[in-house]
Amino acid sequence: MRRQLWIALGCTAVALGAAGVVLPLLPTTPFVLVAAWAFAKSSPRLHRWLTGHRVFGPLIADWQAHRAIAPAAKRASLLSMLAVFGLSVALGLSPLLLLIQGAVLAATATFILTRPNGPRQG
């Protein structure tokens, strides 16, 4: 039963990560990393598939080898956070909710910006 839950989590994360490739407000990298983690706990076959994937594999490899996030992924994440916060302001959310959302997004942005960019492409 536990194995099936990890597989379900991994499949859901892959689906959200794949949607994030084409949807500008949905980040790809965090979902792919969650999927890799879930598959590592449940299915060596799915883990190999994901880590060998031409789009998702490099994101995982950068994180595993260097705890790095590529500059393009950083930009996309930060722009998404700004867009979501801007939408919240435009919708007129309460100041308390905006404060909480702003604090969470600021902490997340700080984490993302303090990660290395990974090995230099050359």
Image: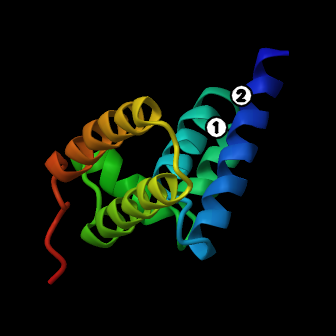
Q: Amino acid at mark 1?
A: Phe
Q: Position of residue 12 (x, y in %)?
A: 74, 45
Along the polypeptide, which appears first: circle 2 or circle 1?
Answer: 2
Q: Secondary structure at mark 1?
A: helix
102 sits to left or right of 25: left
- Horizontal side of 109 relative to 120 (left or right) equals right
Task: Out of 53 and 116, give the one closest to the viewer.
Answer: 116
Quadrant where the N terminus is found in the figure: top right
Q: Residue furthest top?
A: 1
Graded by Cα atoms within 10 Å as few (under 14), some (14 to 19) or many (20 or more), the crowding at tag 2 reads some
Q: Is residue 72 above or below residue 122?
A: above
Residue 71 in the image: state x and y as whole percent.
25, 69
Q: Which residue is mark 2?
A: 6
Q: Is residue 119 left or right of residue 35?
A: left
**Image point 38% across, 68% down: which residue?**
76
- Say how the picture is coloured: rainbow
Q: Indicate whether 37 appears above or below 50.
A: above
Where residue 15 sits, quadrant-wise, is bottom right
Of the pair 13 and 113, the residue shown nearer to us: 113
Residue 29 coordinates in the image, percent (x, y): 46, 55
Residue located at (25% from left, 52% from top): 68
**Callout 2: SS:** helix
The residue wearing badge 1 is 39
On the image, which quarter does residue 53 sit in?
Answer: bottom right
Mark 2: amino acid? Trp
Label pair 2/1, CB-CB below 8 angstroms: yes
